[in-house]
Amino acid sequence: MSLDIPLRAMSDGKSIPSLGIGTYLVPPNDAARVVAIALQVGYRHIDTAALYGNEREVGMAIAESGIPRDELFVTTKLWNSEHEPDKARVGINASLERLGLDHVDLYLIHWPAPRVYGDSYIAAWDEMQEFKREGLATSIGVSNFNVEHLDNLNGETPVVNQVELHPSFSQVPLRDEMARRGILIESWAPLDRGADLTDETIAQIAEATERTPAQVIIRWHLQHGFVVIPKSINRPRIEENSKVFDFELTPAQMQAIDGLNRDNRQGADPATADF
Ligand code: NDP
């Protein structure tokens, strides 16, 4: 079964399913089960990374699903220590080998990491464009990039910027700038790793819409035009998080959630991350 998940257009002419399954902190010994469930439920977009240590198991689940490759959208990411062009090439080839794929649909620079690796992300972006020309990655983008990091890149504009974004950290200035540049936002930690689910406003909207808090928050991302990749290792939650295309939040409900921003980051600040 596949869900009828709407696609979002990317600036390179390709498209990306607006909902995917996240796999950060899904341990290798569980990742094949989790991805298999997501594919059974109807997800067709999987977000992984070399860092997550589960690409091999993600690839096993893909292979065992029997779903045609062109119906799937697989994202993986280049780790910070592999920005140098020769290391980046080793990095993408190792990811493809572990995934059992000859290309990924989207390859991202995971972090700019200027504190530790200087401006090496600039050369990494040059090499990413080469990977695209060679067909190793259909589309290329970045993750955790601030505007200044984007300004330093040469050549193509990244199609997406995957950043931390959830109601209590809603990144309005960065969103506005990405919209201006035609860069799609992908929200990581879209549920604030669970923390935003207990917010009183979210609870009230969930009650009014007869949906769960997670569905309300995922819907808020979708109605803002973001690509959203919630992670769960539990089948009922993976199913719940996918049932978000048959209802709509009102403008007032969207505004109420917009009002929850507290600039409350879960993860590292891209400018100062020390890894
Ligand atoms: P999420 O905001 O997706 O939250 C995941 C947490 O929420 C888990 O503890 C999960 O629990 C819980 N959860 C999920 N669904 C529900 C539900 N319906 N009801 C109650 N609790 C729920 O955080 P992530 O950090 O995982 O972000 C999502 C994805 O974004 C990652 O998995 C990864 O793919 C990507 N990411 C990218 C980063 C980057 O630097 N580019 C950084 C971090 C994440 P349980 O699993 O036990 O169900």
Image: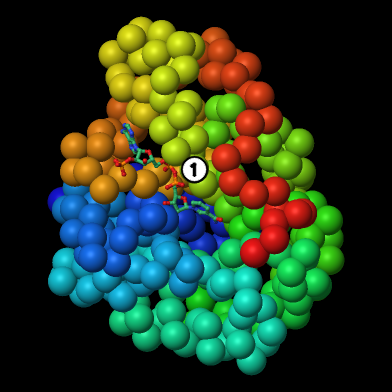
Q: How many marks?
A: 1
Going 37% across and 22% down the picture, which residue do you hit? 213
Q: Which residue type carries mark 1?
A: Ala
Residue lying at 46% horizontally and 72% vertically, measured from the top left: 50
Corner quadrant of residue 263 = top right
Residue 192 lies, in percent from the top left, at: 49, 35
Q: Tell me residue 224's x, y (percent).
A: 56, 32
User: Cβ(mark 1) to ligand 1 < 8 Å?
Assistant: yes
In the image, farthest residue toward the front: 274
Report helix, strand or loop for mark 1: loop
How is the rendered protein coloured?
rainbow
Label 1 packing within 10 angstroms: few (<14), some (14-19), many (20+): many
Query: Is residue 61 among what the camera can see?
Result: yes
* Horizontal side, residue 270 vs residue 98: left or right: right
Residue at horizontal 63 percent and vertical 24 percent from the top: 261
Horizontal side, residue 121 vs residue 31: left or right:
right
Q: Is residue 216 visible?
A: no
Is 172 placed left or right of 26 in the picture? Answer: right
Compared to residue 39, the image places residue 108 above or below, namely: below
Q: Residue at x 56, y 73 (%)?
A: 78
Q: Nearer the viewer, residue 1 or 23?
A: 23
Ligand 1 appears in which quadrant? top left
- Identify the residue position indicated by label 1 in the image: 189
- As rendered, which of 62 and 49 lies closer to the eye? 49
Q: Please determine whether, in this image, residue 240 is positioned above or below residue 95.
A: above
Q: Quadrant of the C terminus?
A: bottom right
Nearer the observer, 15 or 216: 216
Percent of width and height locating residue 195: 46, 29
Q: Is residue 132 left or right of residue 214?
A: right
Q: Is 173 situated above or below 3?
A: above
Percent coordinates x, y for residue 62 in the rendering: 24, 69
